[in-house]
C-alpha cells in the first residue's frame, strides 16, 4: 500500500529530491525518443546532458545558457509578483514585443544618437513600453472588472501585429532583406559580450540586477507581505489595510516593466533591429509563465528553474542538429522537463510511505 503523508519539516532534500526525479524522468523519456529517432541514442542522451561542459565549446554554450536563463528569469520573476496576488497577467510576450518597439521608437525620436550613453535611455523607453502595454488589461480589470487573463492574452496578438506593421510600414528598412525588418540601431547602442564570441553579454548582468531588486521587494517589503496575504487569504487583504486595486496596478506595472526591459535588451543585444514577429518573438513570455510556477513563485526558485530549462534546451538543440533528427526533438525534451518538474512538485510537500507504515498510518488517521 502507498500513502502520501504531509511533510512536517521542509529541508533542502525535500526540494532537491523532486528535481532529481524530474531529471531522471527527462533522461528516460529523452532516451526513448532518441531510441526511436536516432542511430546512437546512448551517445546522444549523454551529449544532451553534458554538452555545455565540453571544453572546446564550453564558453560559447554556457554563454547561451546564461543568456536564455536571464530572459526567462527576469520575465518570470516579474510575472510572479502578480501570480502571488492572484493577478493573472499571461501577456508577457506582448509586453516583451512592445518593450522592443518602444525602445526603437525612443531611438528614432531622439534623433538616432550614436553614443553609448544613450543606452540606459533606450532601455528606459523599453521599460515604459512594457508598462504601458500592461496597463491596458490592468485598467480593464479595475474599471470594468474584465478578466485580465483573457485581455492580456489577446493583447499579445495585437502587439505582434503592431510589430509586423512597423517593420513593413513606417520603419521598414532594407527592401532587399529576406524578411520585414527595420534599419539597425547604431553599433554603439548594441550591448556587447562580456566574453568575446559568446552570448554572455552585459544584458545578462542588467537582468540579474533587476531580479535581485525584485527579490528584495518580494521578500523584505510591506508590498511583498501584501502579496503573500493576497495569495493565501484574499479577503484578509482588505482587513489588513491593503488595496486590492492597488495590488492589481502594481502587479501589472512591475511585470510589464520586466518584460519590457527584456524586450529592450533583446533588441540591443541579439538582433540590433526590429524584425517581423514570426522571426522575432520566440515564446519567451509564454515559457516564463511556466518557469514562474516551476520556481514556486520564489525569485531564487525561478532562477533555478529557468537555468534548468535553458540547460536542457542547449543540449537538446545540439543533438537535434548534430544527429539530424526531427526538429521537434528539442522542444519535446524541453516540454518533458517542464512536465516532469510539475508532476513531481507534490513531493516537496508530501512524502511517500510504503507497506506497513502506510497501513499503520491509515488505521491511525
Image (tube, rainbow, N blue to C red):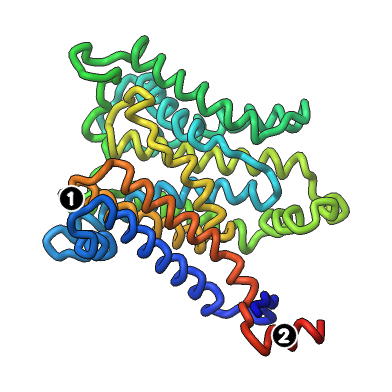
Give the secondary structure at mark 2: helix
Quarter of the image holding residue 90? top right
Tell me residue 317's x, y (percent). Answer: 27, 49
Which one is in front in this view, the residue at disc 2 or the one at disc 1? 2
Q: Residue at x 41, y 36 (%)?
A: 263
Is 196 displayed left or right of 12 in the figure? left
Is 34 displayed left or right of 245 in the figure? left
**How many C-alpha atoms fall within 10 Å of the one at disc 2: few (<14), some, or many (≥20)?**
some
Q: Residue at x 50, y 63 (%)?
A: 300
Mark carried by residue 107: none
Give the secondary structure at mark 1: helix
Q: Is residue 97 above or below residue 170?
A: below
Confirm whether residue 206 shows in the render: no
Quarter of the image holding residue 327? top left
Which callout, 2 or 1, points at the residue further toward the start of the chain? Answer: 1
Quarter of the image holding residue 179? top left
Tell me residue 294's x, y (percent). Answer: 53, 57
Tell me residue 88's x, y (percent). Answer: 65, 41
Q: Residue at x 27, y 42 (%)?
A: 326
Mark 2 vs 1: CB contact within 8 A: no
Is 10 displayed left or right of 204 in the figure? right
Q: Residue at x 26, y 36 (%)?
A: 190
Tell me residue 321's x, y (percent). Answer: 20, 46
Which residue ends up furthest to the right in the rendered image? Answer: 239
Residue assigned mark 2: 359
Q: Is residue 11 above or below residue 198?
A: below
Indicate the quadrant containing the C terminus: top left, top right, bottom left or bottom right: bottom right
Residue assigned mark 1: 323
Confirm whether residue 185 shows in the render: yes
Foreground pick, 248 / 168 = 168
Foreground pick, 340 / 127 = 340
Q: Is residue 364 above or below residue 218?
A: below
Amino acid at each position: 500500500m502507498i500513502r502520501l503523508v504531509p511533510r512536517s519539516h521542509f529541508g533542502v532534500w525535500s526540494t532537491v529530491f523532486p528535481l532529481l526525479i524530474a531529471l531522471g524522468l527527462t533522461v528516460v523519456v529523452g532516451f526513448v525518443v532518441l531510441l526511436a529517432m536516432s542511430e546512437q541514442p546512448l551517445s546522444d542522451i549523454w551529449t544532451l546532458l553534458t554538452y555545455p561542459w565540453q571544453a572546446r565549446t564550453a564558453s560559447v554554450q554556457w554563454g547561451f545558457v546564461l543568456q536564455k536563463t536571464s530572459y526567462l528569469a527576469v520575465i518570470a520573476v516579474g510575472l510572479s509578483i502578480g501570480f502571488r496576488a492572484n493577478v493573472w497577467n499571461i501577456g508577457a510576450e506582448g509586453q516583451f514585443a512592445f518593450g522592443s518597439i518602444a525602445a526603437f521608437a525612443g531611438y528614432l525620436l531622439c534623433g538616432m544618437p550614436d553614443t553609448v550613453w544613450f543606452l540606459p535611455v533606450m532601455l528606459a523607453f523599453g521599460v515604459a513600453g512594457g508598462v504601458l502595454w500592461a496597463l491596458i488589461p490592468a485598467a480593464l480589470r479595475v474599471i470594468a472588472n474584465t478578466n485580465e487573463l483573457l485581455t492580456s492574452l489577446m493583447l499579445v496578438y495585437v502587439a505582434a501585429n503592431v510589430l509586423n506593421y512597423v517593420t513593413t510600414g513606417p520603419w521598414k528598412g532594407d527592401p532587399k532583406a529576406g524578411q520585414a525588418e527595420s534599419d539597425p540601431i547604431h553599433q554603439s547602442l548594441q550591448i556587447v559580450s562580456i566574453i568575446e564570441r559568446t552570448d554572455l553579454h552585459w544584458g545578462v548582468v542588467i537582468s540579474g540586477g533587476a531580479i535581485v531588486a525584485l527579490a528584495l521587494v518580494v521578500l523584505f517589503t510591506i508590498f511583498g507581505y501584501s502579496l503573500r496575504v493576497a495569495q493565501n487569504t484574499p479577503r484578509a487583504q482588505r482587513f489588513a489595510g491593503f488595496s486590492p486595486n492597488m495590488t492589481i496596478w502594481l502587479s501589472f506595472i512591475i511585470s510589464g516593466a520586466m518584460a519590457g526591459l527584456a524586450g529592450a535588451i533583446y533588441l540591443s543585444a541579439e538582433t540590433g533591429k526590429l524584425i517581423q514577429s514570426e522571426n522575432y518573438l520566440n515564446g519567451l513570455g509564454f515559457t516564463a509563465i511556466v518557469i514562474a510556477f516551476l520556481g514556486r513563485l520564489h525569485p531564487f526558485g525561478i532562477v533555478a528553474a529557468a537555468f534548468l530549462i535553458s540547460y536542457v534546451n542547449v543540449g537538446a538543440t545540439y543533438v537535434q542538429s548534430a544527429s539530424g533528427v526531427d526538429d521537434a526533438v528539442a522542444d519535446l525534451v524541453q516540454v518533458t522537463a517542464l512536465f516532469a518538474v510539475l508532476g513531481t512538485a507534490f513531493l516537496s510537500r508530501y512524502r511517500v510511505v510504503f507497506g506497513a507504515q502506510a497501513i499503520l498510518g491509515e488505521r491511525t488517521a
